Image (cartoon, rainbow, N blue to C red):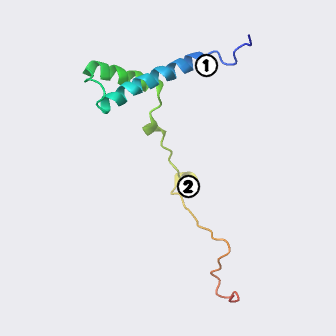
Amino acid sequence: MAARLRKTHQDDVRAKIQASQLINVLQNHALGLTEDLPASRLKAIEILLKKTLPDLSQLQAEHTGPEGGPLVVEVVRFGVSDDKDSPAE
């Protein structure tokens, strides 16, 4: 059998499967497909998901201009001339 390239791959896959199972429990609860979940179980699911999934609200990118100043956007249009000295078509 060939050697594994990444030894943690199996652990990563296992964590993703477990996270998807927790998400399924929450979706079924939100859709009313299951009985009410106790608050302790909801809190446990929240804690486990925070450990396995990235918090997307913290991944916001901030764009700034040179030296942290405001970002300046310049629109350049090709094929359109604003030059009044150019010959008319």
**Can residue 51 be seen in the rendering of this structure?**
no
Q: Which is more toward the observer, 26 or 66?
A: 26
- Amino acid type at image mark 2: Gly
Determine whether, in the image, residue 26 is placed left or right of residue 14.
left
Q: Badge 1 local density, few (<14 within 10 Å), some, or many (20+)? A: few
Residue under label 1, please give it: 9
Q: Which residue lies furthest to the right in this view?
A: 2
**Mark 2 neighbour class, 10 Å CA radius: few under 14, some 14 to 19, many 20 or more:** few
Q: x, y (%) of residue 71?
A: 53, 57
Residue 48 coordinates in the image, percent (x, y): 41, 21
First-in-chain label (2 vs 1): 1
Which one is in front, 43 or 61?
43
Which residue is the site of mark 2?
65
Question: Disc 1 residue type?
Answer: His
Count of marks placed on residues: 2
Q: In this view, does 43 lie above or below 83?
A: above
Considering depth in this image, is 13 or 49 the residue closer to the camera? 13
Quadrant housing residue 40: top left
Q: Can residue 85 be seen in this view?
A: yes
- Quarter location, residue 36: top left
Residue drawn at x 31%, y 22% as measured from the top left:
43
Residue at (52%, 50%) from the top-left corner?
63
Location of residue 38 in the rendering, given as x and y in whole percent from the top left corner: 25, 20
Picture quarter with the N terminus: top right
- Write the residue at 31% across / 32% down: 30
Q: Do the residues labelled 2 and 1 touch (CB within 8 Å)?
A: no
For mark 2, give the secondary structure.
Answer: loop
